[in-house]
Image (cartoon, helix red, strand yellow):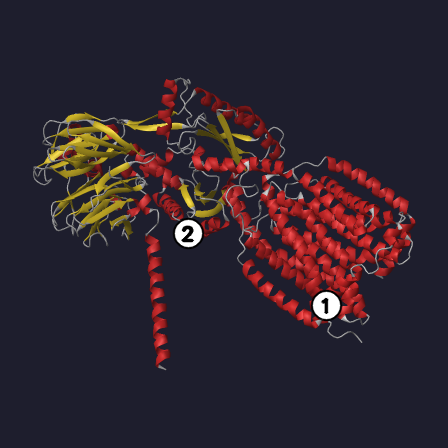
Amino acid sequence: MLFSMLRFVVVSFISLSLFISAYAQSVNEIALQPLADQSLVFDIATFSNTAIAVGERGHLFKFNGQWQQVSSPTVALLTNAFLVNADQGWAVGHDATILYTQDAGQSWQVQMSSPEIEKPLLDILMFDEKSGVAVGAYGLFYRTQDGGKTWQSEFHHELLFEEDVAYLEELKAEDEALYLSERSTLLPHFNRIVRLNSGALLMVGELGLVATSDDLGFTWQKQDFLYEGSLFNGVVTETGVYVMGLRGHLFYSNTGTGQWQEISLPTQSTINGGIVLNDSTVRLVGNAGVILDVKSDGEAKLVAQRQGENLVSIMTDPQGQLWIAGTKGFVKLEQE
Amino acid sequence: MLDKIVNGLEAFLFRQRLVVIFSFLLVTVFLALQASNLKMDAAFVKNIPLNHEYMKTYLKHQKQFGGANSIMVAVEDTSGDIFNANFFDSLKKVHDQLFFIPGVDRAQVKSLYSPSTRFTEVVEDGFAGGPVIPADFSTTDAGLAIVRGNIEKAGIVGRLIAEDYSAAMVSAQLMDFDPQTGEPLDTLAFAAQLEEQLRGEFENEHIKVHIIGFAKMAGDVAEGAKGVVLFFLIAILVTAVMVYLFSKSILLTLLPLACSLVAVIWQLGLLTVVGFGLDPMSILIPFLVFAIGVSHSVQMINAVRRRVGEGETTKAAAASSFRSLLVPGGIALLSDTVGFMTLLAIDIGIIRELAISASLGVAVIILTNLILLPLLISYCKLSPSVKAVKKADGNDIWRKLSCFATPKYAAVVLSVTAVLYGVGLYEANKMKIGDLQGGAPALHFDSRYNQDTFFITDHFSITTDVMTVIVEAKPEACTYHDQLMQIDEFEWQVANTPGVESTASLASVAKRVNAGFNEGNPKWQVLPRTTASLVQAVGRIPTTSGLLNSDCSVMPVYLFLQDHKAETVEVVVDKVKTLAATMNNEQLTFRLASGPVGVMAATNEAVAEAQLPMMLYVYGAVFVLCLLSFRSLRATVAVIIPLYVVSTLAQALMTQLDIGLAVSTLPVIALGVGIGVDYGIYILSTMAVKLRDGVPVQDAYYQALVERGSAVIFTGLTLAIGVSTWFFSALKFQMDMGILLTFMFLVNMLGAIIILPAIAAVFWRKPRA
């Protein structure tokens, strides 16, 4: 009697656990796909023992020795990720999406999503757990002071082009609605925002936009820049800052505010990202699979070129291993 | 009643012997002339189930999106680097030559040299672009350097250029009709032109030409099928030796062979008369006709010999043998014919052709071997040695074999049969549908065609294993974000299915174009929500890309598969069906399927669906015929059970040997059953008479063996030899068919002499009073 009861319990326990695992699997299958880590991945963020990454179709990854996809609350393409500490992080992307995690990237919640404005967010920079900014296409600019519970839009007219300022003034008097709609498309794309060693902010973007702010981005000073093509990224080193962009253009400045000098690269491909390797070298990645090393003396050489893929960003995982994210997913860089 | 007809026929035929023989001669001459006009024929549409749901989709959109009938020519530079003047000259000539071969759809010839091969690049103020090979191209180092740069910008590496730059591709779609004559395209002539005008002309020590595509494969298959002439001669030779050993008389060896060859000539001649060509697959029919003819002739000479031995004149012996064999022989052949006719129920052109030509061939044997042969024999003066056939011919063996009809042995035989059946059924259920190997399944692994296929799939990121899902929508559907998003989601889900290597659709290409419009920034690789941007992205994609029609109401999703093995295709088809079931709505319909693998999927499904009905028809036909001739349910069941066990074992053998159920192997079971039933009919027709007279089962079986046993065993061996030469065929499917038919013929023979008497021992336990 006892024996048969015991057997019943064991059997039901086994079948229950089978049921649960089958159920869990079916839920996972909906969200997770085997090709996710070989599809577009755009950014990797690392903080002490945590590393996360984001990509197309709302793909989110967490690093635990390898890149593991985790469930996502969105299908919008995610462009950038940021960790403020080992637990709290944000991701931004198309449809003006902002996601938030407080368990080191295991689970994510939507803080903002505005498909109707038809613009993507391209970068996010948090100053601390509470405050930070997210920027994007056509001058999209949001600020939070409460850890992302609310995001307020800002319009930085100081970054408008002069001819557009006049045009908008004229329009404002005539037609308020048209003024607002025109205004929403006249600012250049804000591609990347980084914090300089001085504590000031540097933002780069479309049409040679380089701007700095000393007050956490409330007001911006637009620089008279020597190049009119788009800039996609900025890499801060111990001594200064590089900005990079279209068709192999790279510039360096000691302060980020004053003199820029152009460094000629042995490629005409767009440079999307970079990382400081050591005191003397910055490694850059870009379209057409280019991987370049730039020395502090300005010498640049092509390290490798990966056929048929565009490389977007480069980062180290918590073990110090270099990873590149791009249009064919994660690329592990062998240490030389 | 039947006896009266037979007697009347005998009297008539044997009185008019000369006239009858002369008319046979006339008909043979006429049909031989017809047969000499017989052409090899391997049209694409014959191989596909035209009424299958997928094929309706395929045919509906074939004109717009090209069909499954494409040809790919990879021109390889043996030095491993294409950037030299000689290579580019050769490539241009290959392109031009292919362009001008009749039957090629000139609008769809693609290579570096086609005007649609263009590059675009992002510059600060927008796009720059042009043809990959500029108008002022010269094969100088400078010119080649420009082309090399353009190739990289155009993103055609892997498609038009090998990934390692060792080869370049020229691809084309074929039309189903020759535009000049309006006749259906002669696939084999086209394949010959490819061989001569491309490979023959341009292949040398620097340049290698790899050609793949259905037309080329059909050509190679037809070329390989020519080897069957040799096999046929070998089969005739071996059969001749066998017949001589059986008959011990040169004359009685030559007459059956001659009559069987007459049957083959008639069959081939009739093919031309009904307007068929000889297909590489139906080339097996002459072998079957010959072997079946010989086996029935052997029954005939066996009967004559016995009667002559009993003291009749040769003429009288021939006449009485005719009388006694016309009905069982006729029924056996008729059931063969009906067995083949059941294949007509399968909606694949080539199987229907096989059914018709096999039925014709077997029906003809009734005339040549049951009528012409005894008439010819009646002119012979059989030698004493023939008459003196040992009375005790194998009597000991027959005595021993007759034990199978005793209850003790029957119990053993039936138990073993039951076990074999059980194991067979288990294995048979694991039988796979479709092609189980990579490459062209019709050809061997090391054939030039398959080697070319492997070269192309290794060096290019394309594959011939393409399945296309057609998305049907309302006009201008591609300007709606939500609809393209749905196609994109569908594509992504399918791309993540095991077996799918890569995919392409309007949605995924539009995303890349959108990134292009945003300075090549991959972060903009999305379908823009703004209608203007979406239209801008989609508008850059021409209809020649094959991704949309002119009003984008049709947008195919291309699935490039790892291979076309049955399991791979099945998994992908299932996934597409599941997705379509949830995603189809009033705006979008996802339809299977086009592309070569789409055709294969349809064929696999048609074959799988046809299997059960075919078996039901063929067994139904055999059942009715047996019932008619024996007028006994017991006898009918006793004949059919061994047959059924053997068909199951044949399916188990297919599982064991990795032979899939395909267009070529599907008919084998029907052929095997149709012919295999003969043995049982011959044995049981003698037994039934004795049993009705009250003879005990074992004695009845013994007497049947004495009368028919050697002929039955001999028949099994002859048939098996006829088809076993196919083991050595250059064509893999002929080898498969050869193995299976040999098995069916031999084991059905064993079934008739071992299992049948055991069943009889149970059914007729008590002799009639």
Q: Which residue is drawn at 21% across and 31% down?
A: A293
On screen, A138 above or below B500?
A: above
Which numbered disc, 1 or 2, marks the residue that appears first in the sequence?
A: 1
| Viewer can see residue A248 | yes
Pointer 1 and pointer 2 on the same chain:
yes
Q: Quadrant of residue B233?
A: top right
Give the amino acid at mark 2: Leu
Q: In the rendered structure, the residue with mark 1 lies on which chain?
A: B
Q: Which amino acid does label 1 sit on?
A: Cys
Report in which chain the residue with disc 2 lies: B
Query: Residue at label 2?
Result: B579
Query: Residue A212, relative to residue B56: is it above or below?
Result: above
In this rendering, would B404 be left or right of B106?
right
Query: Residue B166 appears at what percent x and percent y?
Result: 43, 29
Residue at 24%, 42% in the rendered image: A43
Give residue A322's position: percent from left, percent from top.
Answer: 23, 41
Tell which of B583 and B500 is nearer to you: B500
> Residue B65 bears which disc, if any?
none
Residue position marked by numbered label 1 in the rendering: B403
